[in-house]
């Protein structure tokens, strides 16, 4: 329960749990776990602190300490991981954009499971493999799976289409087509079992099965099947050979290596299955609290294995038994069998851990070198852009506006922000046009910029600070309308000098108020490329908002007017497609595949959508 205990900490319990440091506005600064909450919190406020460089800053900002008592250190570990994920405190080492890492899901909760990439919430009925460090690594793995295993590729919990016609994947040998009974349930389950074995790293067994099947098929004169099994074995062997490492043992484990320097850290996870390194994932972490590498690794493990498959053994460069024991206890509960978390002293496992540690160091150095090069290039680009467009200062904060509507209906506008040449998506804003009738883009643009600047003048922190450059997706009409707004609101020095420019799509010309001739930036130059990126992002953001509003209106209209579609079927349709846009773009076969929707109603919906 919350206690206003700063600087008095006598109210804190002397029991296991988590402690939460908050600032004067209630924001979470740091979350930690402890065997004894009172003594652990007290260590932060001694004269020397706990030795970490940022502790002095943390102590100055703490105004309240909350706590949650737990029954054991393992329970406290789970609480800590969940709170860090929820609040992302600045002084904790936490995964950057942890929600965006992709996974491969095998929908084992379905009668005929599917296999695909996902970034969405996890369904406990299904099996998830990951996280993968990038979408590219997921698609590379799925490409191998698609070429090797004939699982179904159709969407939805049930296979096939109501028409009964198999899809193209069946005809090219990429799907076993359970929808038409071309494969039995037992045979399809074996295909999914092979997919899971592949994702778990058990590739040698799959190769042996295919080689044996190839020999049997050849002896039975079934040369077509033998050739298919030969190609599958070759593809699997290529994957195995690419991943193989010289490890004498046949063990399966993960090696977690961390390297920390300053406010950044890198963690590498080497996955070893049956004596082979089958995967290496790299993660960058924010480490504003400047924890050491050992602490970073120990705080990373619960966050990582919240969704990733837990192996029997995890290797880490720490010998702190008091810290490792609750982690092992927590992961053992997640796996359902005993998990060992330890530091290897010798042999192949020590070599793999050292390899992970070295890769973490190199990974962070590489990232810093790339970041420094990006900063240098960006500084040069912004400086040239300032000169080319005659701006009063470097355009560190660029705001771009675009308007989207359909024949004057559902008019919306977007405001995207690029800070230091990169999209600052937490600063994006979207607007519904309120005071303009019909398709009048200049007036709509002027309304949106006026509303944005009035919010700035009112002191609204969500619209602060002022931009260094306002960029408009449009031409002279939009520019003139917005320039008039700036002149009106800036009278009397109420606004700083905010330059405005318009980037016209056709010739990629940049227009400036009061200047008859446009500025033409060199084609392919970094300056033009930056403006195009900002403009295109504003266009995308505005169109996405407009499509969403239009989709909602059209979906409600189509479904509400159809006989035979009540609240239950309407809910099923929307749940099946996920978004209004997906529903509006659905084919007849996809509509017929909606569970519980009769074919007649599906055809009526399709006809209404495409009339």
Image: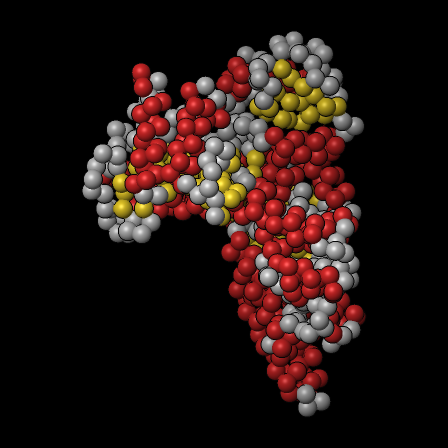
Q: Which residue lies furthest to the front in this view?
A: 437
Which quadrant is the C terminus positioned in?
Answer: bottom right
**Image position of 493 (left or right of 346):** left
In this rendered view, identify the residue nearer to me: 388 or 33. 388
Q: Which residue is drawn at 23% across and 46% down?
A: 520
The structure residue drawn at horizontal position 70% and vertical position 34%, both measured from the top left corner, is 78
Q: In this view, does 187 lie above or below 137?
A: below
Q: Name above or below for residue 579 compared with residue 228.
A: above
Q: Where is residue 95 in the image (x, y as percent from the top left)?
A: 56, 39
Residue 560 sits above or below residue 415 on the image: below
Res. 520 visible in picture: yes
Judged left or right of residue 475, residue 283 is right
Coordinates of residue 573 in the picture (x, y in percent): 70, 53
Q: Where is residue 196 in the image (x, y as percent from the top left)?
A: 69, 61
Q: Judge by depth and name the residue closer to the eye, 150 or 429.
A: 429
The reply to whether residue 429 is visible in this rendering is: no
């Amino acid at each position: 329960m919350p206690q206003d205990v700063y600087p008095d900490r006598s109210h804190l319990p002397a029991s296991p749990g988590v402690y939460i440091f908050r600032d004067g506005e209630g924001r979470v600064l740091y979350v930690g776990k402890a065997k004894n909450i009172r003594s652990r919190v007290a260590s932060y406020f001694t004269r020397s602190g706990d030795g970490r460089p940022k502790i002095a800053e943390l102590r100055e900002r703490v105004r309240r300490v909350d706590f949650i008592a737990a029954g054991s250190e393992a329970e406290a570990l789970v609480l800590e991981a969940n709170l860090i994920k929820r609040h992302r405190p600045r002084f904790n080492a936490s995964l950057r954009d942890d929600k965006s890492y992709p996974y491969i899901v095998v929908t084992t909760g379905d009668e005929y499971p599917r296999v695909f990439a996902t970034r969405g919430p996890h369904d406990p009925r299904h099996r998830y493999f990951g996280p993968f460090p990038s979408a590219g690594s997921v698609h590379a793995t799925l490409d191998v799976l698609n070429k090797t295993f004939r699982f179904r590729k159709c969407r939805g919990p049930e296979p096939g289409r109501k028409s009964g016609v198999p899809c193209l994947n069946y005809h090219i040998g990429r799907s076993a087509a359970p929808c038409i009974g071309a494969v039995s349930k037992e045979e399809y389950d074996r295909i999914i079992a092979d997919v899971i074995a592949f994702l778990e790293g058990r590739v040698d067994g799959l190769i042996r099965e295919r080689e044996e099947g190839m020999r049997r098929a050849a002896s039975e004169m079934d040369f077509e099947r033998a050739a298919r099994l030969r190609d599958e074995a070759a593809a699997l062997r290529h994957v195995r050979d690419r991943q193989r490492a010289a490890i004498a043992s046949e063990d399966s484990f993960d090696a977690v290596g961390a390297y920390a320097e300053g406010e950044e850290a890198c963690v590498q996870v080497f996955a070893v299955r049956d004596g082979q390194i089958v995967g290496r994932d790299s993660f960058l972490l924010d480490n504003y609290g400047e924890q050491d590498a050992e602490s970073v690794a120990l705080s990373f493990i619960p966050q990582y294995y919240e969704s990733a498959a837990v192996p029997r053994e995890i290797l880490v460069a720490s010998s702190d038994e008091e810290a490792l024991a609750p982690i092992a206890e927590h992961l053992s509960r997640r796996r359902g069998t005993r998990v060992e978390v330890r530091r290897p002293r010798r042999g192949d496992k020590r070599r793999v851990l050292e390899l992970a540690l070295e890769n973490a160091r190199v990974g962070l150095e590489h990232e810093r070198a790339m970041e420094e090069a990006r900063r240098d290039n960006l500084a040069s680009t912004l400086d040239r852009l300032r000169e080319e467009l005659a701006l009063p200062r470097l355009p560190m904060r660029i705001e771009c506006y675009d308007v989207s509507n359909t024949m004057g209906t559902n008019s919306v506008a977007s405001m995207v922000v690029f800070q230091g040449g990169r999209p600052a998506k937490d600063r994006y804003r979207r607007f519904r046009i309120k005071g303009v009738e019909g398709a009048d883009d200049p007036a709509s643009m002027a309304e949106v910029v006026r509303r944005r600047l009035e919010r700035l003048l009112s002191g609204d922190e969500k619209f602060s600070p002022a931009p260094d450059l306002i960029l408009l997706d449009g031409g002279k009409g939009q520019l003139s309308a917005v320039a008039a707004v700036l002149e009106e609101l800036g009278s009397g020095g109420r606004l700083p000098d905010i330059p405005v420019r318009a980037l016209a799509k056709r010739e990629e010309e940049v227009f400036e108020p009061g200047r008859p001739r446009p500025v033409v930036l060199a084609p392919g130059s970094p300056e033009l490329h930056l403006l195009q990126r900002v403009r295109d992002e504003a266009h995308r953001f505005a169109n996405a908002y407009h499509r969403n509003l239009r989709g909602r209106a059209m979906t409600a209209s189509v479904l509400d007017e159809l006989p035979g579609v009540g609240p239950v079927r309407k809910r099923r349709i929307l749940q099946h497609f996920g978004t209004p846009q997906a529903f509006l773009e659905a084919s007849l076969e996809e509509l017929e595949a909606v569970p519980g929707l009769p074919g007649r109603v599906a055809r009526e919906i399709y006809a209404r959508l495409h009339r």
